[in-house]
Amino acid sequence: MRRDLVQWQWEGYSQFHGSRLNLLIHIFAVPMFVLSTLNAVVATINLQWFFLSSSIGGMLIAFMAQAVGHAQEKNASIPFNGPLDAVTRIFVENFFNFPRFVVSGGWLKAYRAAK
């Protein structure tokens, strides 16, 4: 795991989120990822295997949609250093930095500046 991951990811966040398509994908895919993850936790606690599998499917779809969005960026995302780096960066982005980007006004500013 990267040191100071939250801050490291935040410092370059707008650099990797400037494409209008990527911004639109993220505004829908991030809540889908978060809700699917929370539903997966509840389904696991309640031993509801169908809902667990559909929740994991929702997480994967949301992640793949975000990957498509990131491919539209002029600045390519920094490659993952391995599985742990991938998982921690994905969860920090979806649960913390993207919501922070929206609440801080960064998303709207980037959307308006995008061509």
Image: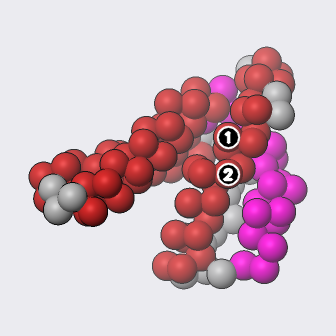
Mark sitting on residue 96? 2
Q: Residues within 10 Å of mark 2 (few under 14, many from 20)?
A: few
Number of callouts: 2
**Do residues under tags 1 and 2 come within 8 Å of each other at their CB atoms?**
yes
Q: Which quadrant: the N terminus? A: bottom right
Tag 1 residue: 99
| Residue at left offset 40%, top offset 53% | 37
Q: Amino acid at mark 1?
A: Pro
Residue 3 magenta-drawn?
yes
| Residue at left offset 13%, top offset 52% | 50
Residue 17 falls left or right of residue 10: left
Main secondary structure found in the magenta portion: helix
Is 92 placed above or below 26 here? below
| Residue at left offset 71%, top offset 50% | 97
| Cα–Cα gap, marks 1 and 2 | 6 Å
Q: Quadrant of residue 86?
A: bottom right
* Rendered location of residue 20, percent (x, y): 66, 26
Quick check: can you spot residue 21?
A: no
Residue 40 falls left or right of residue 51: right
3 or 67, which is in the foreground?
3
* Rendered location of residue 52, percent (x, y): 23, 56
Is 83 placed above or below 27 here? below
- Secondary structure under badge 1? helix
Q: Start and end of the magenta stretch?
A: 2-22
Residue located farthest toward the front when viewing the structure as drawn:
46
| Residue at left offset 56%, top offset 60% | 91
Residue 25 magenta-drawn?
no
Quick check: can you spot residue 91?
A: yes
Q: Quadrant of residue 40?
A: bottom left
Is 80 placed above or below 7 here? below
* Rendered location of residue 56, percent (x, y): 29, 55
Is 46 placed above or below 111 here? below
